[in-house]
Amino acid sequence: MSEKPELLIVTGMSGAGRSTVGNALEDLGWYVVDNLPPLMLGPIADLFTMAKTPLQRVAVVIDVRGREFFEDFAESLTAVRHRDVNVRVLFLEANDAALVKRFENVRRPHPLQANGTINDGIAAERRALLSIRENADVIVDTSDLNIHQLSNRIADGFSIASTSKLQLTVMSFGFKYGLPSDADMVADARFIPNPFWIEKLRPFTGENQEVSDYVLAQNGVSEFVTGYVAALKPVLKGYLNENKRYATIAIGCTGGKHRSVALVNEIAAQLGSLSDVTVSVKHRDLGRE
């Protein structure tokens, strides 16, 4: 594993939790610089070699507060990636409803709304950040996370102990509630007969042994799980080789209650045997019905 110093660039939507992430990283031992103009990425990278006490892990928060400086982000990022440093971009995302609520709670305007509404500012920011989001190494959706949950998520992915392994989240979800915006890969469990239509199974979830047994015993499910896990192994190894340390696999069914939950638990159990991967399970939509 490379011993290169690490530069983590934290960016994303205003109101999505950049301050919380900066504080969490600082608690984990990162040297954190807030509201950095992108043009300063090069000088910041010099801290790894020119400081009296060379730094090993530096995180910088870059966002639209930099206004015209933010336009230089892509060029500055390309330049710093050519240095002898492991560079990762963490993009913080949240849905419009969550962002509006957060701005209303603190009674502050969105930095890009000008004379318009908060929604206008959010829309303008999404457009400005689109290319950065598409090229981010890690995307974290904070819509349903409180401050403590977000801090724990950062600790899972960016603590010193986590850097040598891939932090993999295997998530179930319901298609009727929308795709997870932070998923790296999505699979569809709706090819499996739905336990919802079996009266004695309907009240339970995929966490229930009887429901799980029913789902996993259906035609084609065993082959799907075996083939999917086999297909994931080289992908996860490739992520590690490319210094991607956090990934989310999402598996959906209609409501995220029965089939996807049972599949996620089984797939996570099989992936848990990999020595260079730490697996956690999240059932996003359990309890929503």
Image (tube, helix red, strand yellow):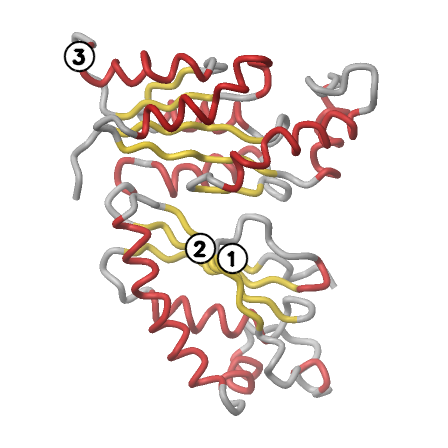
Please name the residue shown 29% across and 18% down the image: 45
Q: Which mark is residue 77?
A: none
- Number of numbered markers: 3
> Circle 1 sits on which residue?
282
> Circle 3 sits on which residue?
53
Percent position of residue 255, x then y: 69, 68
Quarter of the image with the N terminus in it: top left
Q: Is residue 133 above or below residue 231?
A: above
Percent position of residue 122, x then y: 71, 30
Q: Please, which residue is most extreme toward the bottom here? A: 219
> Circle 2 sits on which residue?
169
Q: Earlier in the sequence, mark 2 or mark 3?
A: 3
Give SS at disc 2: strand
Seen from the viewer's position, the closer of residues 287 and 231 is 231
Give SS at disc 3: loop
- Mark 1–mark 2 contact, CB under 8 Å? yes
Q: Is residue 223 above or below residue 286?
A: below
Amino acid on which the number 3 mark rests in the picture: Thr
Label 2 CA crowd tier, 10 Å (few <14, some 14–19, many 20+): some
Q: Earlier in the sequence, mark 1 or mark 3?
A: 3
Query: Label 2, label 3: how many angstroms apart (C-alpha)?
Result: 35 Å
Instruction: Say which of marks 1 and 3 sits in front.
Output: 3
Percent position of residue 118, x then y: 78, 25
Query: Label 1, label 3: how many angstroms apart (C-alpha)?
Result: 40 Å
Please name the residue shown 33% across and 52% down the image: 239
Amino acid on which the number 2 mark rests in the picture: Thr
